[in-house]
Amino acid sequence: MTRERVLDVSQLEAPEPFRAAMAAVSELTPGEYLCMRHRREPFPLYEALAEMGFAYRVRDGVHTRYEILIWRADDPALEAHCGPASTAQGEPKRGCR
């Protein structure tokens, strides 16, 4: 079973979105993923996520310009649910709830 956590940082100024994302991913439990809503693509976040063992997928958002799905890289069920890890944009899939 997968569960989604939503984090909307679209109104925050740097570096608050980075800090909020780091705090949120550290609380993810097995089977959970984070859907981060952002007005811009958070490039500094991606390297930090990889170093911490997280995968991510960037897509066009429904509520904001970007949605970044973040999950533990060692969770194949979440990769199947969220789609392959990538930085590809423009994929019109369902948005965060």
Image (cartoon, helix red, strand yellow):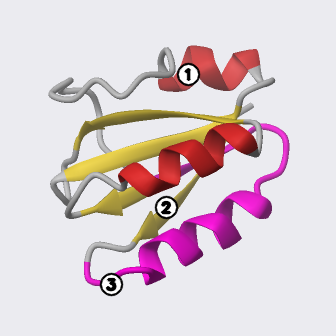
Residue at the disc numbered 2: 6
Look at the picture and state if 74 lies above or below 26: above
Left or right, 32 with reference to 18:
right
Q: CA distance from mark 2 to mark 3?
A: 15 Å
Q: Are marks 2 and 3 in contact (CB under 8 Å)?
A: no
Q: Residue at x 56, y 44 (%)?
A: 47
Quadrant assignment for the N terminus: top right
Find the distance from the CA under tag 2 to the CA under tag 1. Answer: 15 Å
Q: Residue at x 24, y 50 (%)?
A: 66
Give the magenta range: 11-35
Q: Amino acid at mark 2?
A: Val
Which x, y percent locates residue 4? 58, 49
| Residue linked to disc 1 | 81
Residue 60 visible in this rendered orientation of the protein? yes
For residue 63, above or below residue 88:
below
Mark 3 sits on what residue? 12
